[in-house]
Amino acid sequence: MKLKIAHLYPDLLNLYGDIGNITTVTKRCEWRGIGIETDSIYGSEKIHFTDYDLVFLGGGSDREQLLVRDKLMSMKDELTSYVNDGGVLLAVCGGYQLLGNYYKLKDETIEGLKILDIRTEIGDSRLIGDVVIENEQFGTIVGFENHGGRTFIGDHTPLGRVLHGYGNNGKDGAEGVVYKNVIATYLHGSLLPKNPVLCDHIIKLMLEQRGFPTELAPLDDTAELDAHRYIVDRFTKK
Ligand code: GLN
């Protein structure tokens, strides 16, 4: 049994420890004897997405998002088919915005992949800080956000409701999007080390898509859950 991750543009989209998400998925697989490897994708080479069990898009500055957009556009159809076929995709912040219809900056608009029917517009200030959200299935999810863009998700289902922080736009209390097997979120941190339940959910989806058994051996998550709880207690308990 072997799983494969495609990490898209780690040189341009990798803010606030986003690479820790790859490390966490990899380690939590390896600790259970599940083989896993990552291909880092840098160019606009043709990618066979069917070879992959997880595609990861991290966050980036507006400038880096502008640099990456043409490369991303060249794989629009293949990535859309991957998602429509149930492929697992994790996108953080800048990567999340690029999955939508567009990201409107002050002087120009970055066209998105239109995989999610969402739009993002830059605001007058940056939304920065620790975040705690509540998801019905996973409970609390913690992370760190730093974005100028405000995202409006229309009819999409959010990843969670904001308990502390700003989330998608600082106004409607929604954070992120869950769509098919796509999880898109503003949460850096990185996201998965302090949210082992969410990480294991992603691993299960990866296994399920390949038709492998999805039963996961328990791990000792004491340190991870302590770190998680510290953030929840600090920001949501009076
Ligand atoms: N450049 C985008 C914004 O500022 C995304 C930032 C990020 O990925 N942290 O909204």
Image (cartoon, helix red, strand yellow):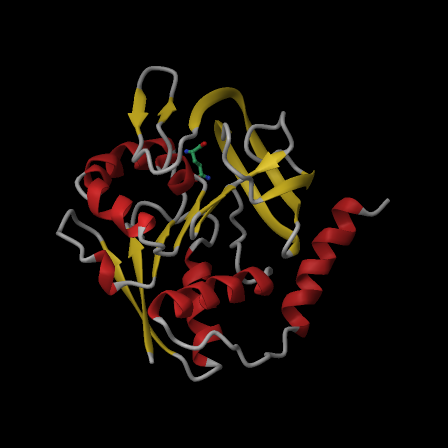
Image coords of residue 195 (percent x, y): 59, 60
Q: The C terminus lies in which quarter of the figure?
A: top right
Q: Position of residue 16 (x, y in %)?
A: 48, 49
Q: In which quarter of the image is residue 196?
A: bottom right
Instruction: Please tell me which residue lies in front, 148 or 212.
Output: 212
Task: Name above or below for residue 115 compared with residue 192.
Answer: above
Task: Give the quadrant of residue 159.
Answer: top right
Decide if residue 8 is on the left or right side of residue 97: left
Q: How many marks?
A: 0
Q: Which of 123 and 115 is in front in this view?
A: 115
Question: Which quarter of the picture shows residue 2?
Answer: bottom left
Identity of the residue furthest to the bottom in this view: 33
Identify the residue at image location x=63%, y=73%. 221
Left or right: 20 with respect to 221?
left
**Residue at point 13% right, 51% down?**
45
- Return the residue nearer the eye: 153 or 27: 153
- Is residue 99 positioned above or below 3 on the image? above
Q: Give the quarter of the figure containing the N terminus.
A: bottom left
Left or right of 234? Residue 64 is left
Residue lying at the far right in this picture: please name it: 238
Q: In which quarter of the image is ligand 1?
A: top left
Q: Position of residue 102 (x, y in %)?
A: 35, 26
Asked whether 63 or 191 is in front, the reply is 191
Q: Residue furthest top?
A: 107
Q: Identify the residue shown where x is 52% and y is 67%.
A: 200
Q: Where is residue 25 in the image (x, y as percent from the top left)?
A: 45, 67
